[in-house]
């Protein structure tokens, strides 16, 4: 009987600790400041031989983001809108690398899309 009561108390205490931890962590999330917009990076060849493909991909991304923003943005974050920032990767690996570094260092996107063409 004593062993059973001790086991039940132990389980109840663990559950209380878990619930308090969840409550405290949820208040921490609420205290964080949400961004005004979420930046999505776009790396595509916008000049050179493959510009037609990069331009089409960029138009598709813009259309998708416009659709999401017109529907109210990211609802799970309170309707924060998305913004697309595009960089031209040019025609070679070095210019693509520089474009990626520039995009990330200047705009800090949460995701980077593109570069489906490689040689």
Image: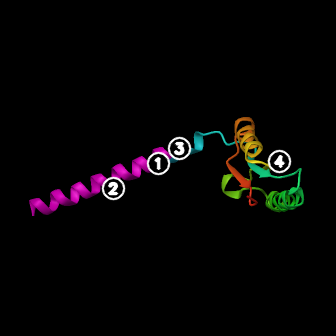
Q: CA distance from mark 3 to mark 4?
A: 46 Å
Which residue occupies 79% across, 47% down? Answer: 89
Question: Regarding mark 2 in the picture, which secondary structure is present there?
Answer: helix
Q: CA distance from mark 2 to mark 1?
A: 12 Å
Q: CA distance from mark 1 to mark 3?
A: 6 Å
Which residue occupies 83% across, 52% down? Answer: 45
**Tags 1 and 3 in contact by the CB under 8 Å rule?**
yes
Image spot of residue 6 (x, y percent): 16, 56
**Tags 1 and 4 in contact by the CB under 8 Å rule?**
no
Q: Earlier in the sequence, mark 2 or mark 3?
A: 2
Q: Is residue 96 left or right of residue 10?
A: right
Nearest to the eye among marks 3 and 4: give it: 4
- Up the image or down, 89 lies above or below 50; here it is above
Q: Which mark is residue 23?
A: 1
The stretch of residues the image draws in magenta is: 1-25
Q: Earlier in the sequence, mark 4 or mark 2?
A: 2
Q: CA distance from mark 4 to mark 2?
A: 57 Å
Quadrant of the image occupied by residue 33:
top right
- Up the image or down, 47 lies above or below 104; here it is below
Q: Earlier in the sequence, mark 1 or mark 4?
A: 1
Question: Regarding mark 1 in the picture, which secondary structure is present there?
Answer: helix
Nearest to the eye among marks 4 and 2: give it: 4
Q: Which residue is mark 3?
A: 27
Q: Which residue is mark 2?
A: 15
Which residue occupies 88% across, 57% down? Answer: 55
**Tags 3 and 4 in contact by the CB under 8 Å rule?**
no
Image spot of residue 85 (x, y percent): 80, 46
**Quarter of the image that includes the C terminus:** bottom right
Q: Which mark is residue 90?
A: 4
Question: Regarding mark 3 in the picture, which secondary structure is present there?
Answer: helix
Q: CA distance from mark 2 to mark 3?
A: 19 Å
Q: Pick the residue in front: 90 or 59.
A: 90
């Amino acid at each position: 009987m004593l062993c059973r009561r001790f086991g039940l108390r132990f389980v109840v205490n663990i559950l209380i600790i878990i619930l308090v931890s969840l409550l405290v962590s949820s208040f921490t999330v609420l205290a964080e400041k949400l961004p005004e917009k979420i930046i999505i990076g776009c790396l595509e060849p916008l000049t050179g031989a493959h510009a037609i493909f990069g331009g089409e991909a960029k138009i598709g991304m813009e259309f998708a983001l416009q659709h999401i923003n017109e529907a109210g943005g990211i609802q799970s974050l309170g309707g924060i809108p998305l913004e697309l920032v595009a960089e031209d990767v040019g025609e070679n690996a070095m210019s693509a690398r520089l474009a990626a570094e520039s995009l990330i260092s200047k705009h800090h996107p949460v995701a980077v899309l593109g570069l489906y063409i490689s040689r």
